[in-house]
Image (cartoon, rainbow, N blue to C red):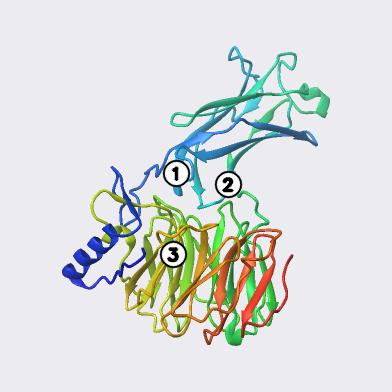
Amino acid sequence: MSGSRIHVRGRVGRLAAALAVAGGTLTVVSVALDVGPAPAGASGCGVALGPPQVQGAAGSFAFVVPTLPTVPGEACNATIAVTGTIATSGGTRPTNVAGNGAPAAVTVSFLPGEPGPDILWQWSPHCADPASLLYDFFASSPTAGAKSAPISGVSPCSSFGNVNSSTLRPPIVLVPNPGAYVGMAGGDGNLGYWLVQRGGGVSAFGTATDLGMPFGNVSAVGAANAGGSGYWVATADGGVFAFGAPFFGSMGGIPLNAPIVGIAATPDHGGYWLAAADGGVYAFGDAAFYGSVPGVLPPGASLNQPVVGIAGSQDGKGYWLVAADGGVFSFGDARFQGSMGGTHLNKPVVGMAGNTLDGYWLVASDGGVFSFDAAFKGSLGSITLNAPVTGMAATDDGLGYWMVTADGGAFAFGDAPFWGSAA
């Protein structure tokens, strides 16, 4: 969004903002974005199924089916009907498998720059009647097509003792690379920080305390300091998990066209904002809604790259969003200080943090830092990293910042103390 300022203040402000956006890093397409959540049952985007991987151990088979968006690189949510079936190539099914061929609905989230999730079916025990036939596992969806893989080593139920039946359990969605770190939050007084894994794991350093982690099959996308020893963790489906902190609400259970990609707390820790990949913003607690990207786009316009992060202004009366191409969008009293939109980047931007003077930093996956009305305190751009940078957090006084890498490495700059890392 180089050269564009977005301040949503009434109808005239919205029109001016739309014109500013039109002159920035946008591409006109045939589908307009929606400012609100998708209607119930909305599919969000197309999904393709990959070839099943068959894994067998300890009397069970696991059928793991990868997913990916039909538009490569699209950041979106989708709810699809899927069916897992054990049968021969001619369609003959074993007679003793409960749940075989039963349809189910699953929701998958495709996050910017991250692999799609897998869908898992478990067959236990893997016994078939008759066991003499050659069976395949078929994963199918009315909208995503079908994929199959041969099953080897199928046994009769008698081989497992007094068993005469088996079950193909309903599918579950697996978080891809759950051990990868995807975000961080700084603690009060710069005396510690939390690192958060995609699978929800939390690693605490300094005086920060590990009070728990979210459990489920949805990717965690970030964390925010809730004041004191508490923190919030946000997940891609809009869920918010509060630990040592009040819960102010979430988008969990509400279908969203685009996954949530970040969370930012208000200065008094009385609320938080969630940002979605399409630029949608959802406000909770004392966090006020000041606008979103879909609300200021001209009809038929779309972002070149998905939004990847959010940061609140110093007084909590505004916020910035940043996209993977470095475009910055400002709302409320958050001042537009510049962006990397329209500039060639070696690697995509993955996050941002605000200082205490209405400036901000952007960080790219190679550790490069871009400063806008914020003092540059250093970067990792010239260092070969073992894993890409996935997020950053600013110190309380805005005179430093930390970065986290996917392998749990933590890096401190300016007055940000180093309290340790998970790498």
Q: Is residue 397 visible?
A: yes
Where, quadrant-wise, is the C terminus in this rendering? bottom right
Residue depicted at x 57% and y 26%: 147
Residue furthest left as drawn: 12
Q: Nearer the viewer, mark 2 or mark 1?
A: 2
- Residue drawn at 39 percent across, 52 percent down: 304
* Residue 170 appears in the picture as rendered: no
Q: Is mark 2 on a helix, strand or loop?
A: loop
Looking at the rendered structure, the kind of residue marked 1 is Ala
Q: Is residue 226 above or below residue 24?
A: below
- Nearer-the-camera pick, 371 or 309: 371
Q: Which of 396 and 221 is in front in this view?
A: 396
Q: Residue at x 41, y 79 (%)?
A: 313
Determine the image quadrant of residue 170: top right
Disc 3 or 2, which lies upstream in sequence?
2
The mark lying in front, picked from 3 and 2, is 3
User: What residue is shown at x 30% (from left), y 70% (from top)?
Assistant: 5
Neighbour tally class for label 1: few under 14, some 14-19, many 20 plus, Cα within 10 Å = many
Q: Which amino acid does label 2 sit on?
A: Pro
Which numbered marker is on residue 233? none
Quadrant in the picture for residue 132: top right
Residue denoted by label 2:
115
Picture coordinates of residue 264 (x, y %)? 47, 72
Up the image or down, 370 lies above or below 294; here it is: below
Q: Position of residue 73 (x, y in %)?
A: 49, 45
Horizontal relation, residue 61 to residue 81: left or right: right
Residue at which label 3 appears:
340
Instruction: Tell me, for residue 78, which label it has, or none.
Output: 1
Residue 66 in the image, given as x and y percentages of width and height: 59, 38
Judging depth in this view, the residue of 192 and 255 nearest the camera is: 192
Where disc 1 sits, the SS reads strand
3D distance between C-alphas at marks 2 and 1: 15 Å
